[in-house]
Amino acid sequence: MVAVAAPDGDAATPDDLDDAGGADDADDADADAPAARTTIAVLRVSQGGEALELVRWVTKPFATEAPGPRGATHYVLEDAVTGERLAAGPCPLPRLCTCPGPDHPRGCLRVRHQGVVRLKLPRLAPVERLTIVGPDGPIATFTLDEAS
Amino acid sequence: MTWLRRIALAFLLAGPAGAQEPRLTSDLASTDWARAVDVVILSEGYVRAEEQQFLADARRLADAIRVDPDAAPLRAGPPINLHFVFVPGRDRGAPWQAGRPARRTPFGAHVTPEGSFDADDAQADAVAAEVAPDVDVVVVLARLTPADEPIPASARRRWARAEGDDLDLPEDPDDVRPNADVPTDGARIRTTTLDPEAFLHELGHALYGLGDEYEEYPGAPPEDERWEVAVCPNLTLERTGRRWKDIVDTAYEGGGLWKKGVWRPERRCRMRESRADAFCLVCQDVIRGGREVDAPGAPEWTRPADDAVVLLPAGQRRLKLEPRWRHRGDAPVSFHLDLRRISPDGRRRQVWWDAVEGHARRTTFEVGVQKAGTYALGISAVNLAGESEVVWTTFTVRPAGATSGLVGALGEATD
């Protein structure tokens, strides 16, 4: 068990417990339909999972698998032009160490203070808005514009 | 495994210091990218004229998957594609001495002052995603500088200090240990051309989330590190081995780097001896089926009930709870628990989290609380395919009269 070392006070965004991030009304029917293309997004995670940076994203010409349950952290994909919700799915993030030191070797694994993950998403619109939602609400939003 | 065809493509890519013209060579088993496992091996420490050397080194690594008898469980699973990405750098060789800065190589591989082999993960993932048709695991394969390279005095001083700090710093290129990130940490391997025998072990981490079964530390894991055992399907904190009783009925003490208090399924396994031995039956089971299962269904809380009231004895600052839950379907690898305090304006702050093994249906925890109020306890089931929805139960902590019962009674929520 792990007690969380955090400054006293409430830093999180308010959210309904049953509707983290307000994403539950994303179109599940669309989310279950495989997309003809896939976006692979490389994300850098820091500050105990509370800060995200989009390092790079690429679009691939193959269909993604239908996304599974959303888990503790999930993505919401919207058409950036129309605002239509396109898909939602899981976005598992690494559990990062919050101690002030450097990364710790742990056998042949690493205890990380900053992580990098790859997220696979269906590609459904020319300009998409990608929002990563944690248990306390949105963590970060990025625009995925194929023209850029 | 049948290798259907071999393709070679070349890409132009704006890269980091020294990186030019990444070139892709793929050995494909399937073009069903969503189902296939795509292993992307990146060159590190090679210069422009050394592509053939890299391909030879990378294929030697890949042979661990293709022909090693101990890799049979991997070959029994989804088809495995191998992608070799050659990215020439300006300098030949990555440094092997601890604390020596990265050279002008594409992914900045180096050994940290603490002795851990590291690289620029973001750059590696970005190049892999850009160049390969798909990517499920990224491997940075580094050719190191030679052992007879003059050793700086600063490195010698660091080694001398490390003796006192009990650090395991390499004193030779052969001492550089490969390492890996499990799937939730990015599914990644950093290795060297000098240690291809360890590749299968590292794939056990990176592709299947298996834990180390060897021992490095005396004693048992401390309380705040027990979750690291819970998330590994081949380790348990229970001497009975109940976790894998449907596969083997044995449990041997020692694993997860700890000599005591952690058990592994069998005496020998590739996850215990990194460079020899077959995978044990439990690891084989994970490898054969782990990537083709569905994400688990969500558990259900049975205690504390939603809207329960938990009495906190006057003057007490410790909240002790014994939550219980149900779960239908196959047991997940682990359950993840998350306790948050809800302030009057609805804002939430995490105060505790934990992970417990997938056969558990209850746990006990005690956490310091600053004040009475409303709390939310979340639980989700996790396996290699993903994580279930998080299910929350909310309860209110109220101070009881000064003569109320013991802290231990607080788990008896009004459910």
Image (cartoon, helix red, strand yellow):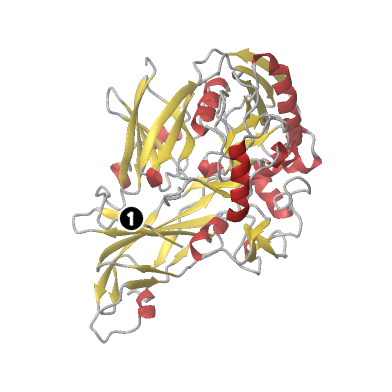
- Disc 1 sits on a residue from what chain? A
Image coordinates for residue B141, horizontal then vertical, percent: 65, 30
The amino acid at mark 1 is: Ala
> Is B70 left, or right, of A120 in this rendering?
right
User: B4 and B103: which one is in front?
Assistant: B103
Regarding residue B36, the answer to whether it shows in the image is no
Q: Secondary structure at mark 1?
A: loop
Residue located 18% across and 55% down the image: B345
Image coordinates for residue B261, horizontal then vertical, percent: 61, 67
Residue located 45% across and 47% down the image: A96
> Is B8 left, or right, of A23 in this rendering?
right
Quadrant of residue B275 within the rendered picture: top right
User: A9 and B332: which one is in front?
Assistant: A9
Up-down relation of residue A48 to residue B106 (above or below): below
Image coordinates for residue B59, horizontal then vertical, percent: 74, 27
Residue located 26% across and 49% down the image: A15
- Which quarter of the image is occupied by the C terminus of chain B? bottom left
Q: For label 1, count other residues whose C-alpha is less than 10 Å away and answer few (under 14), some (14-19) or many (20+).
A: few
Q: Circle 1 is placed at which residue position?
A: A6
Residue located 25% across and 47% down the image: A13
> Is B333 left, or right, of B203 in this rendering?
left
Quadrant of residue A55 within the rendered picture: top left
Image coordinates for residue B106, horizontal then vertical, percent: 56, 24
Up-down relation of residue B335 to residue B370 (above or below): above
User: B248 and B355: which one is in front?
Assistant: B355
